[in-house]
Image (spheres, rainbow, N blue to C red):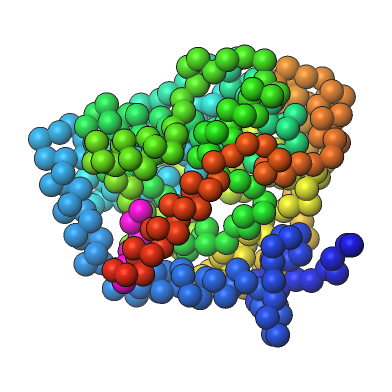
Amino acid sequence: MTREYKICTHCVMDTSDPGISFDASGVCNHCRSYEVEAKPIVDRADSGQAAPELARVVAKIKAAGKGNEYDCLIGLSGGVDSSYVAAKVKELGLRPLAVHFDSGWNSELAVNNIENIVKRLDIDLYTHVCDWDEMRDLQLAFFRAGVANCDTPTDHAFLAVLYRVAAQHRIRHIVTGTNFATEAILPRAWGYSPADLTHLRAIQRRFGTRKLKTYPTLGFFGRYFYYPVVHGLRTVRILNLMPYNKAQVKETIKQDLGWRDYGGKHYESIFTRFFQAYYLPHKFGYDKRRAHLSSLIVSGQMTREEALLELQQPTYPADKLATDKEFVAKKIGLSVAEFDHIVEQPPHDYSEYPTEEWLYKLKGAVWGAIKKLRGITTARV
């Protein structure tokens, strides 16, 4: 039975999220969850109350990295969040090593932004260039699987590279741009965690044609035991410890770093731009702008009226869509007709393929219980 359409009265999330629910006032579960889980952290950061915690975190990073060439590692994609993190860690007196994962889809603008950032901030940059034949085959396998989490090949490998490089350089802290102020809302039904190595390998075995010999991987044991316990690796969400306003940050990095805008969240990658602006809306009815805009609404950075006006704009200009579709199809080794045939096949849920989701749920439950017992409201992972 088709569900009656409904949109939240506070943000712009709607019933394109199959897991959404509404209270008597028409406010969705995402807004309610934000009030309980994220708002205290965002308010604390905005008011400056998190400044002492930020100072303690910075001191801890410096102490752990004493005598080492670098005291922290940052992932640098050229997007807003990672660019601002690069600027802030330098401002705080840290000695970062920037890591970039070249999946083969960088726009020319992204390359220029990254070059400007490392040059102006005088940061060393390590770039991992993927084996294109393996990456192409894996991405095509995810398309053939018909799932919504087709950005998994890049996201998984980038995380694996971060952990490997940190361990190689004896770096104890990875500083990320993940934050609640602009990323608090993202429906689980719209994708699946890229961290699940069992899921990735299952799709590659079924739909791929190549063995992943050099593709960087990171399993559950490595992420949650080997690297944290053996190497003492920790992740810091530094933007949760300081005021973070997206519009203001964009102006700052434009002026200070020569950064230029891509026109959309994560659009520094041609693949991600096509995936979010065409593939997800066309095949699944998921418009990720709703989640991005709703996150800004609940954190007070945008009004609902402004968001609704933005949603009236097409996800993709028609001329740009045709160009990008042809480019994406050709790059993964298909004609446009062959690619369209794959896209038009019925969608599939990630759960139709093997996963180790039970492990992540167990980890989440255990960590949630520990935080509750300790009264933890930290921005660190």
The picture places residue 316, in percent across and down from the top left corner, at 76, 45
Residue depicted at 38% across the width and 65% down the height: 369
The picture places residue 379, in percent across and down from the top left corner, at 35, 60
In the image as oriented, which residue stretches furthest toward the left?
67
Regarding residue 185, the answer to whether it shows in the image is yes
Q: Main secondary structure of the magenta part?
A: loop
Which is nearer the eye, 273 or 146? 146
In the image as oriented, which residue stretches furthest toward the right?
1
Query: What residue range appears in magenta?
Result: 375-381
Q: How many marks?
A: 0
- Tell me if residue 303 comes above or below residue 147 in the rendering: below
The picture places residue 28, in percent across and down from the top left corner, at 66, 73
- Tell me if residue 316 comes above or below residue 294 in the rendering: above
Whether 377 is among the magenta residues is yes
Q: In which quarter of the image is the N terminus?
A: bottom right
Residue depicted at 63% across the width and 58% down the height: 187
Residue depicted at 39% across the width and 37% down the height: 221
